[in-house]
Structure formats: structure tokens, C-alpha cells
Amino acid sequence: MSKNAKIAAGGVLVGLVLWIWLPWWAVVLIVLGVPAAAYLTLDPSQRRRLRRVARKELDR
């Protein structure tokens, strides 16, 4: 199993545990809020690089 597959499986497991223990609105806030907060902590140059890499992967 690749490193990315392990990370994805762990994310799914954490999501299922949160879904069981927390109300649905709290899970949605966590699932959407954590990546948004992480993106906002990047420098402008890091954001440009991330967008550029994402565009290159879409062009494949």
C-alpha cells in the first residue's frame, strides 16, 4: 500500500469515528475547516506553487 493510500485510509477512518461521536454539522465544519485553515496559513508564494502543481496534474 502506498503512502498516499495509507493517509487516505486513515482520513476515512477518522471521518467515520467523528461521524459517530459528533453531530453532523460539527463533522462538516471539521472536514471543510481544516483544509481551508491549512491553505490560509500558506504564504502567497506557496499558494501560487500549490495552484500551479494542481493545474499541471489536471492537464495530464
Image (cartoon, rainbow, N blue to C red):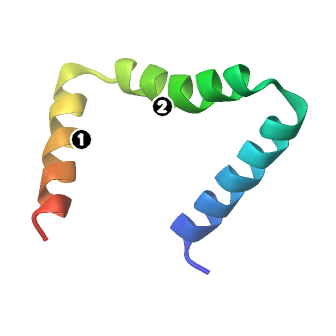
Image-quadrant location for residue 13: bottom right
- Quarter holding the N terminus is bottom right
Q: Which mark is residue 32?
A: none
Left or right of 27: which side holds 46?
A: left
For mark 2, does the 10 Å Cα neighbourhood hold few (<14), some (14 to 19), or many (20 or more) residues? few
Residue 58, image x, y percentages: 17, 60
Q: Is residue 31 left or right of residue 42?
A: right
**Placement of 53 over or under 32, stated as above or below:** below
Q: Nearer the viewer, residue 54 or 32?
A: 32
Q: Secondary structure at mark 2?
A: helix
Please tell me which of labels 2 and 1 falls first in the chain: 2
Residue that extends furthest to the front in the rendered view of this protein: 24
Quarter of the rendering containing residue 50: top left
SS label for mark 1: helix
Residue identified by numbered label 2: 35
- What residue appears at the point 72 percent right and 44 percent down from the top-left corner? 15
Q: In the rendered view, tell whether residue 18 sits above or below residue 43.
A: below
Q: Where, quadrant-wise, is the C terminus in this rendering? A: bottom left
Label 1: few (<14), some (14–19) or many (≥20) C-alpha neighbours in 10 Å? some
The CA distance from mark 2 to mark 1 is 13 Å
Kind of residue at disc 1: Leu
Look at 24% across and 32% down and name the residue there: 46
In this view, 13 is above or below 19: below
Asked whether disc 2 touches disc 1, contact meaning CB atoms under 8 Å apart, the reply is no
Question: What residue would you read off at disc 1?
Answer: 50
Q: Please provide percent x and percent y for residue 47.
A: 23, 30
- Measured as percent of width and height from the top left, residue 44 is found at 19, 21
Give amino acid for label 2: Pro
> Where's residue 53, x and y in %?
19, 51
Name of the residue lying farthest toward the right:
21
Residue 38 horizontal side relative to residue 7, left or right:
left
